[in-house]
Image (cartoon, rainbow, N blue to C red):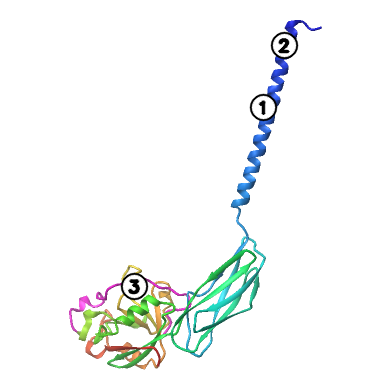
Amino acid sequence: MPSAQKRRVLEKTRKREKRGRTYLVAIVLIIIAVGIGWYVYASATAPRPDFTIAAPVGVTIHAGTPTISTVNVTAVNQFTGTILLSAKGSPGLIASINPSSVTGSGTAILTTSATTNGSYTVTVTGVSGSLTHSVTPNVATPVFATLSTSNGTIVIELYQAQAPKTVANFVHLESGFYNNLTWHRILQANPAIIQTGDPNTRNGTGNRSNWGLGGSSPTVPLEIDSSLHNNVGYLGMARSQALDSGSSQFYINMADNNALDGGYTVFGKVIGPMSAATALWKAQVDSQGQPIYAYAVLLTGVTITNSL
């Protein structure tokens, strides 16, 4: 039988072993808890399979004529599901989409039409299980403007669906602002344009050093739509170095000036003959691109209509 001293040593040893086992169990439990916590956190924050829908911000239609646009569906995080697509127009707008389903990534054609002029919206919705995404492009018929000039008439259509603030500002200025303003900037290349809209040029008078510096208030923001380009015949909004500084000055592209794309709002297009614009473009100018005979290159007035 162990002596009292040996029993005390044995008891201390057993206690240490017991504490060691307790600490070991605690450590194991902590490791398990941390592992479970990390798994839960990683599962909650891991990117989940999903999809996105992209459509034009604005769509210009002409009453009575169907217009098609492309809708892009893009799979995200290895999404492979089937997406059911639908299109619903606001009152007065007929909308359809084909195909009606896409698996993973793909494209669909959105068709919109209306019998009367006006502004509408269309909502394109994609559904796959619990996932739902939608986009709502603006849809509108164009506004028309007739530019009366000293060299004839220029008829343009204005794209209020793609550049609503720019077009609204232009329409607002119709009532007399543009009367007898000079086409004060006429360039043959880099870029090839004719530009007007500066009140400092009225009647071809005033200090020529101030030509190009005037405008209207308030200014309008830059409105970029990837479907519109600075191609020949298209209208762009002039501005200063600040992106959101467009006001009353605008230009007509006399050649394809695609280097301007993305930096200037394109908001309309000449739809009639370019003969009057070409005559203005051929006017005699000085080294600064200002017309020598300003009285011969005037924008005498602007008339806005909702149809031709």
Q: Which mark is residue 220?
A: 3
Q: Is residue 81 visible?
A: yes
Q: Nearer the viewer, mark 3 or mark 2?
A: 2
Residue 174 x %, y %: 29, 84
Identify the residue under disc 1. 23
- Dot placed on the residue nearer the N-terminal end, 2 or 1: 2
Place residue 217 in its image quadrant. bottom left
Name which residue type carries label 1. Answer: Tyr
**Relative vertical location of residue 106 with respect to residue 181 in this rendering, above or below:** above
Between 82 and 259, the residue placed more toward the observer is: 82
Q: Quadrant of the C terminus?
A: bottom left
Name which residue type carries label 2. Answer: Val
Place residue 208 in its image quadrant. bottom left
Between 239 and 123, the residue placed more toward the observer is: 123
Distance Cα–Cα, label 2 vs label 1: 21 Å
**Label 2: element kind:** helix
The residue drawn where x is 64% and y is 63% is 79
The residue drawn where x is 55% and y is 74% is 124
* In the image: residue 265, left or right of residue 41: left
Instruction: Say few, some or many: other residues with alpha carbon within 10 Å of mark 3 (under 14 / 14 to 19 / 20 or more).
Output: many
* In the image: residue 110, left or right of residue 236: right
Residue range (magenta): 205-232
**Label 3: element kind:** loop
Instruction: Say few, some or many: other residues with alpha carbon within 10 Å of mark 1 (under 14 / 14 to 19 / 20 or more).
Output: few
**Relative vertical location of residue 10 with respect to residue 92 in this rendering, above or below:** above
Q: Is residue 293 visible?
A: no
